[in-house]
Each structure stands twice: as structure tokens, then as C-alpha cells.
Amino acid sequence: MADNEAFTYNGGKVEPGETQDIRYGISETYLGDPVRIPVTIINGEQPGPTVFLSAAAHGDELNGIEVVREVAYEWDLADLAGTLVCMPVMNVPAFLAQQRYLPIYDRDLNRSFPGSETSTGAKRMAYRIYQNFIAPCDLGIDFHTSTRGRTNMLHVRADMSDPAVARLANAFGSHVIIDSSGSDGMLRTEASNRGTPAITVEMGEAHRFQRELIDEALAGVESVFAEYGLRETSTVNWPGWRTVISDENEKTWLRADAGGIVDMHHERGALVHRGDRICTITNPFKDDNVTVVAPFTGLLVGVLENPVVYPGNPLCHLVELKDNVRRVVEREQSASPESPV
Ligand SMILES: [Zn+2]
């Protein structure tokens, strides 16, 4: 078989069979010091696709950092066919501040792709990342968590109308796929529209490492590597059941009709039946409690973590399941002694 090609970026080159840890400058601080993101490039000896794995585009979303680092440093990649571009922390200023957005005018790095050389600070950072480490890739996975104060079960977000993106989304092997084209400036959207099919993986909550979700995501990465032939050892994972939720049905966040303190009765990933109590909104005196019941039978993809709400705040993300899927989930959940997390 022919040798793999070298991976080149502005200022460097990674030869086949070589791994490089890079700190790549994407901006400068108020003191004029470089803002540098960590990038690990693992170039296999055998030819194959170039794949990016990225995390912490939102600085407080930590689970993905561990996923990317474990692939880069703990997996045996001696037989890798292709190239991995691993970016465990893309939004360094927000990561340092442990917040979602760039501390500069609260810009959202994940609405700034593919970036611009001459525009805002956020877009210049996005540009450096995109040009050097995203555009050369054949496909990629961007890891996120729920927004602070909420948690969600691991799921994929992808534009399933794009066959190349759908192949990647299915290969990840999650139970739930949310089918949406995404927003302007979003990494997965802009990359997919420019010839690098990409998906977002959402998992758990901000500010945490959640081991069981990290393991689930690592299995997803392994499955993707099998689908695209990056590693011979792994096989493509079928999750047992799968539901693809379309964009319109995505807006099933149940919202609070009363302000108060929420007592949530289920964990993320639980199946609730129509009429089941999902949560109770209480006041300081624990009277006049408001019970929130499931309007239909479905899966709790996301739930509140921080238990305080104003009227109108989201309580949970309930997703309807087709009958055949629901039966499989019922069987699975009644078989496990503990409630799923
Ligand atoms: Zn995010």
C-alpha cells in the first residue's frame, strides 16, 4: 500500500508515522502574549481519511476534552490508517474563565466559523482554527455538553439530509440523533457545507467529567473509526435502538408555568409515560405545588440540573418515540435495576 501523505498547516508539517503536540497561536492577550490552543496531530503510516476531534468550543463544556485526550494519548494508534487532528480545547480564553462564551464581548466561538482574517476577535480565532485544522479534514466530530444548569443524554446532532453527514451520524451509534441543519457560524454546519462532513455530540452537563458518558462517546469514536477504516480492530456499533428526531419535533422542551424550586422525579434518559409526574414546582413554604405531567409518552433527552425556574424556563426535553422503539426502550429500562443515567 502507498504511504500516507504529510499533514501540513501554516508553519508546520507532520510526516506519516509522526505525532506532534502543537501549541498553535490563534490570538493575543491584552498583554500581547500569544493565545495558543493545544493541537495533537497523529499521522498514520497508512493512508486513510483525515479526521478532526474537537472539544470546548464552549469553554465550560468539559466532557469532550477527556474524550479527545483519551483517543490521542491512551489509544494504541500504531496501525492508524489516516490522520487525526485532535483539539481538546478550542476556546482557550473561555476555558480559562470557565465560561461558555469568549470573555471578549461574550462572543460565541461556535457561531463564528469559518471565521475571517479581518473581522472580530472571535472570527479571527475561528479563522485560524478553521483554515489550519478543520478545512484539511475529510470529516470530524465536535463535542459539547448541555448548557450550564441542564444535562442531557448523549446524542448526536447532524444534518441528516446530507448523505455524507448522515453516514457519520449513524456510524457514531448513539440512541438519539437530532436532525437539524444547525445555525450560521456553527462548526459542524459550516464544515459540512464546505466539504468536511461533521456532527456535534452532546453529552451531559458543563463543568464535569462524567465517566459513563465519556466511555459512551469513546465507543462512538471507535465505531466511526471502524466505518471509515481508520483502525482494523474495531467494528461499527449498532446501539440496539435508535430514534431520529426531526427539527420541528425538537421543540418539545416543557417549560415552567410557575416560578419556583423544582423537584425533578426522573433522570436524563428515562422513559416517561403520558400522565406520569415529571417534576413538581414548589415554593419556599412547600404549598401550592405545581405538578408537571408528561403530555405524551417519551424519552427525557434533557433535564434541568439547577432546580430554580422563572415561568417560561425550560424544565426538560421530552422526545416522542415510535411505538416499536418505545417497546425496545421499555424492555431495556425494565431489565436494568437502576434508572438509567
Ligand atoms: Zn456547546
Image (cartoon, helix red, strand yellow):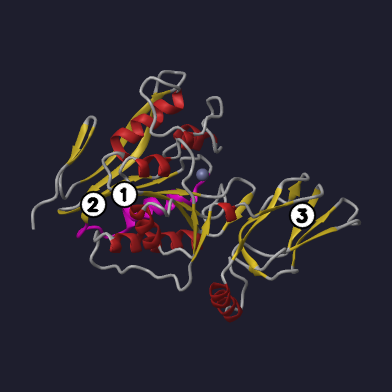
Q: Is the magenta stretch mostly helix, strand or loop?
A: helix
Name the residue located 45 percent from the left edge and 32 percent from the top edge: 112
Residue 125: say if magenta: no
- Badge 1 or badge 3: first in the primary sequence: 1
Q: Nearer the viewer, mark 1 or mark 3?
A: 1
Element under disc 3: strand
Image: 65 above or below 78: above
Highlighted magenta segment, given as a residue range? 61-80
Q: Residue at x 86, y 57 (%)?
A: 289
Label 2 crowd bin: few (<14), some (14–19), many (20+), radius 10 Å: some
Where 9 sits versus 48, above or below? Answer: above
The residue that mark 2 highlights is 49
Residue 89 seen: no
Q: Which of marks 2 and 3 is in front?
A: 2
| Total number of numbered discs in the rendering | 3
Residue 136: horizontal and vertical position, in percent?
26, 40
Q: Which amino acid does label 1 sit on?
A: Leu
Q: Position of residue 219 (x, y in %)?
A: 39, 64
Q: Which mark is residue 139?
A: 1
In the image, 3 versus 173, the foreground residue is 173
Distance CA(mark 2)–CA(mark 3): 47 Å
Q: Quadrant of residue 135?
A: top left
Residue type marked 2:
Pro
CA distance for labels 1 and 3: 41 Å
Decide which of tag 2 and tag 1 comes sooner along the chain.
Answer: 2
Q: Indicate yes or no whether the magenta region holds residue 62.
A: yes
Q: In this view, does 200 lie to the left or right of 265?
A: left
Which mark is drawn over residue 262? Answer: 3
Looking at the rendering, in which quadrant would you find the C terminus?
A: bottom right
